Image: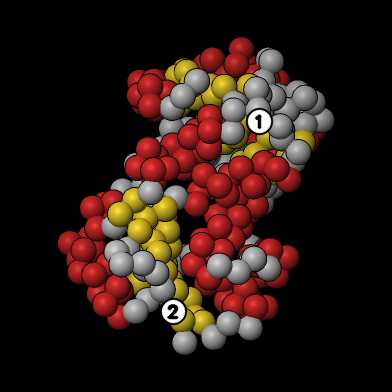
C-alpha cells in the first residue's frame, strides 16, 4: 500500500483527497491519500516522521509552503519561488517541488494562451502570485504584476525576469494591450466582486482566475461578457495535482477522472 497525502493546518477543506483517490482507482494503484494537520512547531518532526514511515509523497499547503524549505532539498524552481507544495520521498533525501507553476501553465494551455512573447498581467503578489509570476516569465511572457501594496509588487518583480511592479490603479493601462490576465488573489471568493475594472477587459484577453469557489467568479463573468476567453480556477487546482501525481508515481495521470472527481465536490 502506497501512502500519499497533504500536510497543512487546517486541511479539512481540501479537495485533494477525492481527486487523487480517483486517480489511484483509475490506475489500479494500491494507494491512499490522507491528510495531516500538525502544529507549526512540529513541522520538522512531521516531515522526518513521514520519511521514516515510508510515506511516498506529500502535498503542502498553508501555512507550511515556505517553512518546509528547511527540511527538504528544493529544486531550482521551488528555490526561486520560495515555496514548496509537493514533497517526494522517493530518493535518499526528501525533495521539494512547486507544482503550482506548472499547474498554472497547463491551465492556461486550455485557453490556447501563447505565452512566448505575450504581455501578461498578474493581479496579486502573494504565494500563488509568486508561483504564477515565475511560470509566466519562464514561458517567455513579459509580466506586469499589480498588487494592492505596490511595494510588494515591486519586490516580486525584482526577482522575476522581465517583470514590472505596479499598483492596482494601473490595471486599465496595463490591460489595454495585454494578452493574458491572471487573478492570483482571493478577491471574488467570499463576495461577488472583481479585482479588475470591467471596462478594462476586452476580447483579446485570455483570463484565468485562481479562485475556484465559486467556479464562475465575477471577474470571469465580466471577462466572458467582454468576449475574452476564460479559465476557471479548478483547472489550476487540477493540474497542480496532476503534476504531483505524475512526479510521485511515474504514471500518466488520468486527467479526466481527476477532473470529474474534483468538480463533483465543488
Is residue 8 toward the left or the right of residue 141 in the image? left
In the image, farthest residue toward the left? 41
The picture quadrant where one finds residue 195 is top right
Is residue 152 toward the left or the right of residue 238 in the image? left
**Residue matched to label 1:** 115
The residue tagged with tag 1: helix, strand or loop?
loop
Q: Residue at x 66, y 24 (%)?
A: 118
**Residue matched to label 2:** 3
Quadrant placement of the C terminus = bottom right
x, y (%) of residue 91?
36, 67
Q: Residue at x 64, y 47 (%)?
A: 106
Q: Residue at x 39, y 69 (%)?
A: 90
Is residue 149 shown to the viewer in this render?
no
Mark 1 to mark 2: distance in Å? 36 Å
| Badge 2: residue crowd in 10 Å (few <14, some 14–19, many ≥20) | some
User: Where 263 sits versus 213, above or below?
Assistant: below
The picture quadrant where one finds residue 60 is bottom left
Is residue 157 shown to the viewer in this render?
yes
User: Where 80 sits versus 24, above or below?
Assistant: above
| Badge 1: residue crowd in 10 Å (few <14, some 14–19, many ≥20) | many
Amino acid at each position: 500500500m502506497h501512502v500519499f497525502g497533504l500536510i497543512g493546518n487546517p486541511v479539512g477543506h481540501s479537495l485533494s483527497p477525492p481527486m487523487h483517490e480517483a486517480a489511484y482507482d483509475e490506475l489500479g494503484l494500491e494507494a491512499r491519500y490522507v491528510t495531516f494537520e500538525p502544529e507549526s512547531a512540529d513541522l520538522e518532526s512531521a516531515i522526518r516522521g513521514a520519511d521514516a514511515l515510508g510515506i511516498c509523497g506529500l502535498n503542502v499547503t498553508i501555512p507550511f509552503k515556505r517553512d518546509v524549505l528547511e527540511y527538504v532539498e528544493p529544486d531550482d524552481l521551488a528555490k526561486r519561488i520560495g515555496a514548496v507544495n509537493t514533497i517526494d520521498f522517493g530518493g535518499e533525501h526528501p525533495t521539494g517541488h512547486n507544482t503550482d507553476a506548472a499547474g498554472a501553465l497547463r491551465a492556461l494551455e486550455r485557453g490556447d494562451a501563447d505565452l512566448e512573447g505575450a504581455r501578461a498581467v498578474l493581479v496579486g503578489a502573494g504565494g500563488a502570485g509568486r508561483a504564477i509570476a515565475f511560470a509566466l516569465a519562464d514561458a517567455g511572457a513579459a509580466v506586469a504584476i499589480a498588487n494592492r501594496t505596490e511595494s510588494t509588487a515591486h519586490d516580486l518583480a525584482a526577482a522575476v525576469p522581465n517583470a514590472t511592479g505596479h499598483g492596482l490603479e494601473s490595471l486599465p493601462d496595463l490591460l489595454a494591450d495585454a494578452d493574458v490576465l491572471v487573478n492570483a488573489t482571493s478577491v471574488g471568493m467570499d463576495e461577488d466582486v472583481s479585482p479588475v475594472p470591467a471596462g478594462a477587459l476586452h476580447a483579446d484577453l485570455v483570463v484565468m482566475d485562481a479562485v475556484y469557489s465559486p467556479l464562475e467568479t465575477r471577474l470571469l463573468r465580466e471577462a466572458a461578457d467582454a468576449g475574452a476567453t476564460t479559465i476557471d480556477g479548478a483547472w489550476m487546482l487540477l493540474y497542480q495535482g496532476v503534476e504531483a501525481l505524475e512526479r510521485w508515481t511515474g504514471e500518466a495521470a488520468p486527467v479526466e477522472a481527476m477532473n470529474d472527481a474534483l468538480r463533483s465536490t465543488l
